[in-house]
Image (cartoon, coloured by chain):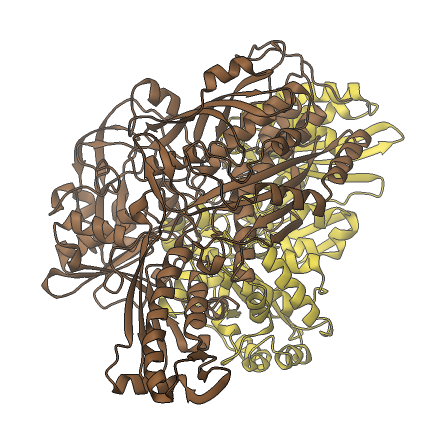
Amino acid sequence: MLDFVRQQQHLTGTKTGCREGDCGACTVLVGESGQNGQLRYRSMTSCLMPLGNANGKHIVTVEGLNRPNALNVVQQAMVDEGGTQCGFCTVGFVVSLAGYCLSDKAPTTQNGIASIDGNICRCTGYKSIERAVERINTALTDRPSTAGSTADGLAWLIENEFLPDYFATIPQRMLVLLEQPVNGIVKHVYSANDDTPAPVDPVFLGGGTDLYVQRPEAMRHAHVQHVFGQDGPHAIWREDDMGCIDGACTADELNESALMQDHFPGLQAHLKLVSSTPIRNMGTVAGNLINASPIGDLTIWFLALNAQVVFLRNNVRRIVPLRELYRGYKTLNKNSDEVLESLFFRLPTPAQAFRFEKVCKRTYLDIASVNMAALIEMVGNRIVRADLSAGGVAPVPLYLAQTSAFLAGQPLTDETLEQANAIAQTEIAPISDVRGSADYKRLLVRQLMKGVFM
Amino acid sequence: MKNIDSYTHVRGESLYLDDLPVVNGTLYACAFGSPVAHGHIRSLDLTDALNTPGVVRILTARDIPGENQIGGIIPDEVLLADGTVDFWGMPIALVIAETEEIAQKAATKIKVDIDPLPVVTDPREAQALGHLIVPPRTFQTGDAEAAFADCDHVVEGRADSGGQEHLYLETQGAYAIPLENGHIKLFSSTQGPTAVQRAVARVLGVGMHKIEIDVTRLGGGFGGKEDGANLWAALVALATHCLHRPVKYVLHRMEDLRMTGKRHPYSSDFRIGLDKDLKIKAYTATLYQNAGASADLSPAVLERSLFHANNTYFIPNLRVTAYSCRTNLPSNTAFRGFGGPQGMFVIEAAIAKAAEELGVSAIDIQRANLLQEGDAFHYGQIAEGCEAQNCWTDAEQRYDLPQLQREVDEFNQNNRLKKKGLAAMPICFGISFTKKWMNQSRALVHLYTDGSVGVSTGAVEMGQGVNTKMVQVAARCLSVHPDRIKIETTNTTRIANTSPSAASATSDLNGKALEMACKTLVERLLAVARVKLNSDTVFIRDEQIWVGETPSGLFWNELIMDAFQQRVNLSEHAHYATPGIHYDPTIEKGHPFAYHVYGTAFVGVTVDCLRGTYVIDYVKTTHDFGQSMNTIVDRGQAEGAIAQGIGWMTMEDLRYNADGRLLSNALSTYKIPDIYSVPSVLDIHFLETAGSEWAIFRSKAVGEPPLMYGIGAYFALRNAVRAFNPTGTATVVIRHSDRPNRIDLPFDAPMTPEKVLLGLFLNENQHSFT
């Protein structure tokens, strides 16, 4: 998307900063129309966005936010507070903040800042940008709660100089777009019912947030099969006491799920630790699991929950416990043409507590040195059950099987945790790398294990 | 006045190098970098790369028509490796292709056979081997060795500070366009257009006049594009010279990280002596600067470490020796502060260590030793307009330092798993290039016949707001509305022989030249007005000519036209040279700085003692801006510098392995502060001071000095860690320690969460959960 915008469309406002989704200078807004015709805009880093994922979407670059001969409210706030110095990152901030204005998030400091948590600035120290956010929030005070999603909301944003006039035409144009058959539309998943033969080993491509970081050159020419956003928002649903998640569900969709929020009170705090807003808007659960990073946050999460993943190939489904998926470093118990359709797991009961810990060099928008998840059930001071998983401590994302087995039935005492740590230290095999020394990671495992029981 | 560039910035309409419309026929370059850090090149196989469809040519050192040399201070830096490679990523060949993608792909197909040589990445090891960039330098005053004998307390130790990647959001790049007669017009993302011009001319073996460098703006520089831009400009110029085609090269982020120099890491030994009143009587230090593979600006950076070895303290007996050590890393270079922060870190570590040994607060030592008016710096200059004490006193009262300390103490008494730390960081930073000849500048002003104004200076806009300040200077001096004024690109054809935009001095130097040019033009215009209005007391106010206290009805644009028709020169090219500065390196004494900038910051942090993570709670500063001419710009500079300084001291962890390969080679592994990691409270009080007559409009230079407040974050974190773990029971004996049963928490920046956690449990002989 970044190359398309800059090189084909000659819209140079969108900047190339890092090409790995870590700076936000290339942020664009991606608008989509739901089944009810309601619009929803999300920020995404265009450097990692496959062009195919734009199918049926409204892509807004900074140029698309410019009002003729006048600044919009976000831009004016940034100017008035000196929120721009060299200017190179600025466009990304402006786009992210415009997305915030288009959202239904309440105008609070916390929400405003969260919208730019994926934008890095090297000049300002962010304080002037924080002041700009306060100005924007003031201007948003009377915004209708459904600002970006309805015609009335858009009209308010246009009237109040947040958006250029053409946004009024977008809902209609989006509907027309959706009704039109699009040449070359990519099917969600190849199946036996497809007329077209499946290519040999297509690359299943979700949000692109890992694949385009790891092998950008190869991906440029790869035969990809898009699984992202082709069917609109992806479902998270309940079957009896099981939680079920579509593989193409994004981290943000997890974050917004009422079902997930109900069963995971710490959900939003946990997911705030996972990458950034634009990346959470793109990255999928399946992508996180299949990428098989030993440090994948959601992988560690679902390992503790003993999630089962459902693979689909030629209309045949195969269920694999997540704990048996990883055979070695980036080696999976999976055929190359199997696609991760969904996963399911037993929802935590009210008696169970789910914990997630993550330590990295930078608390947010960073990859963990060590992360840990735990599903804990206590009766009084006795541990009935404790399922612990840890990342960054082995070639694979690790379920701490022996440690977990030991903990079941033990009283929660310092001595128990010491013994558990001694066992955990035999289960892990961290290496020294840029994210920390092996000694540090071992110490972190001890400390985070203490943390999950606090 | 708001930043004049901000309107186009927020609309995405500002033009950076990669945004310039591409000229028809443009080719794209990609450098092939050495896959090892040190060795002899045995053979280079370009066959596969050349056979890649779309590849036009691959250039090596043999294709260079002039000198294979781009070294600025010392000629020790080749453009393309010839015979040996000296660091991982050192350019060996340049692929030129029809597209960027093809160039990048072809570069991966180049094969090189290299006989490895020993790799040295540690500056102390390099020094021991005699691998020095320049002979060591020693600054001294008094007799430190003799003074130690009279001190009540003498403390020794070691301090290490890490490197820092500039991480300008816009990567390095250049775009060369061939003109007639072998001339080249070159767009470069550089802080030093003249340095680029000189390097290109040298490599091509042509006169500088044939090479035109043009700079609109940079997406950040921070020192990294001072001399660091020369290489990329010279490469595309070479390609354009050889192929007579426009050639563009904008570095991929990972190339930029791998191939470009950074802030110099330093390793240092110190010894500090105090009397019973905590007065610093003697200080010695040996600094080992990790210069990387070539000199670049390292000798000048080294010099500034020596100038700022005392930070803002009066030390009567001082001797500091510094070695610039050649290692097999990319050539480290200028970075905001330019060696000053590294020198200051050592004295602050010495003070902290002394405080810890004596059981007093470092704040008491800092306060007792601040420079006073009339004190001599160790390099001979006398502190004039010294604001060290004023800034400290203001900050202490404004922010209630005793209360800040009480809050920390009470919190720490009441909390076991969280600890707070507080540190003070007073600063003093000298303003001027330490090379006297670099303190000169020029400005060219055209008054157009419609009354509009074109301004060219040698200043490069890189986010520091210099364009805005130049508009202010011209608007004030000419008494015209800022809308009439255009700041032109920085161009070597209009302004020749420029000093780089660096050393915090850009607004002073270029502003002073611009002021001179404007005043000359105003004088010419007033001469016309005097005749026309038949009065000797005319002046211009708000675009109108006044006679005494009366507006004359004669307006700016009419006067311009009158002057033009009278054939008065409406252009002026002024030259400014900072007066009064001098320095004699043979005795290391002189008056190198036009003036000094002072300030004091208090930094408070909270450490999570379970996880080793932390937050910077506040930075509260009183800063000497002089008479700030633009508080929006100056506040922004201070805030940004503080965040960058905190980054250097905390999370920015530049890692090379023993083979000299950069491990923190992407934004996913090299972390700079994000919006959540900057302090929630960042107070900056503008202290009313006289400023300096050598500062433009008495508005003191602001780019670099506040960065050094960030050093306070290191010591605040250290204090918090020590609040959790004041003593230990380890077995390793540290040299110089008078308590051999303890490992001292090392002075080793950055204070990453890893170092915090290991420090919290340092000397722990068993894993305790209580």
Tally of numbered tags: 0
B631 or B51: nearer the viewer: B631
For the question of whether residue B145 can be seen, the reply is yes
**Colour assignment, chain B:** brown
Quadrant assignment, res B262: top left
Q: Which image quarter is the C terminus of chain B in?
A: top right
Residue found farthest to the right: A380
On screen, A62 above or below A327? below
In the picture provided, is A382 more to the left or to the right than A125?
right
On screen, B218 above or below A328? below
Which percent across, then down, holds residue B705?
50, 45
Which percent across, then down, holds residue B325?
34, 27
In the picture provided, is B144 more to the left or to the right than A301?
left
- Residue drawn at (38%, 60%) of the image: B512
- Residue drawn at (44%, 72%) of the image: B475
In the picture provided, is A86 more to the left or to the right than A117?
left
Q: Which chain is yellow?
A: A
- Residue drawn at (60%, 22%) of the image: B354
Which percent across, then down, holds residue A210?
49, 48
- Residue drawn at (28%, 29%) of the image: B134
B344 or B205: nearer the viewer: B344
On screen, B374 above or below B521? above
For the question of whether residue A13 can be seen, the reply is no
B576 or B647: nearer the viewer: B576
Which percent across, then down, holds residue A148?
65, 72
